[in-house]
Amino acid sequence: MDTPQTFFGWIALLWDQYGLIFLKGAGIAVYLAAAGTALGTLIGLLAGVGTAVPIDVDTPLPQKVLLRLVRGLVALYVWIFRGTPMMVQAMVIFYGASAVFSWDLDPLAAGLFIVSVNTGAYMAETVRGGIQAVDPGQLEGAQAIGMSHFQAMRLVILPQALRAIIPQIGNYLVSNIKDTSVLSVITVGELFYLARSAAGTYLRYFEVFFITCLIYLALTTAATLLLRLIEKKLAGPRAYALVEDPGA
């Protein structure tokens, strides 16, 4: 096999030999980002709703203690995972589980857990802000017609809050597609990890990571366009036609 003499020659050779490997790594990155964002959103919802439950003078003492404990645990969780890099979290969780508990974690499962809890820490604050942004009169009105606090949150407040934070969820998804690259430190076979292995064969790092850059760019662009389409669908039509009720 002749050695390529040009930049695009190397690109063609590397893609021909490692194209399927690059696509496999991209698929794993998308899986980790999408599943991690979904699970992180669920974690953030639970944490955000838990901290949004009001505590007043009429709240029974056991419930007050429980709610304050929940708030303290959520605050600690958010503080730790927002205040440390995901790469460090990956090292501590993956290698710490082996050293302290003798757990032999699967790298992919550990990577999904890390992306999920990291996203959940950011989502907890996002959800809390989304809930606080809803007009307080909505909660008061729901309780006035006999709804409990949790019924009002589930049926009235959360749907409005979720609609408001969908753009932020999209931002986390795009960020997670890129941030899965840090999981290479725990041998997760995502795009960056496999690209680094491919680069070592011919020592053509620039060409390999140029291809990798284009793949990441394609993934994040596709995710952005999809999320904009979803936002547009949720926003509904811009023009509304009033139809008279024939029975009125």
Image: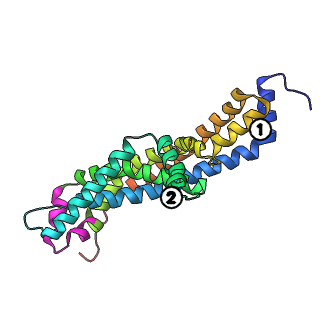
How crowded pointer 2 is (Cα within 10 Å; few <14, some 14-19, many 20+) is rated as few
How far across and down, in percent of the image, does residue 21 sit? 73, 46
Which badge, 2 or 1, comes first in the chain's sequence? Answer: 1
Residue in the image at 69% along x and 49% along y: 24
How far across and down, in percent of the image, does residue 171 sit? 44, 44
Q: In this view, does 17 lie to the left or right of 208?
A: right
Q: Nearer the viewer, mark 2 or mark 1?
A: 2
Vertical position of residue 122 compared to residue 68: above or below: above
Residue 150 sits inside the magenta stretch: yes
Extreme left residue here? Answer: 57
How far across and down, in percent of the image, does residue 196 sit? 68, 36
Q: What number is the disc on residue 154?
A: none
- Which quadrant of the rendered structure holds the C terminus? bottom left
Element under disc 2? helix
Which stretch is magenta?
Answer: 136-153
Extreme bottom residue here? Answer: 247
Count up the numbered dots: 2
Vertical position of residue 143 compared to residue 171: above or below: below
Q: Residue under circle 1?
A: 15
Residue in the image at 35% along x and 55% along y: 163
Amino acid carrying label 1: it is Trp
Q: Which of 159 and 216 is in front in this view?
A: 216
Assign the magenta stretch its main secondary structure: helix
How far across and down, in percent of the image, does residue 169 sit? 42, 50
Amino acid carrying label 2: it is Phe
Q: Is residue 97 left or right of residue 187?
A: left
Q: Residue under circle 2?
A: 101
- Which quadrant of the rendered structure holds the N terminus? top right
Vertical position of residue 226 compared to residue 159: above or below: above
Q: Can residue 133 be seen in this view?
A: yes
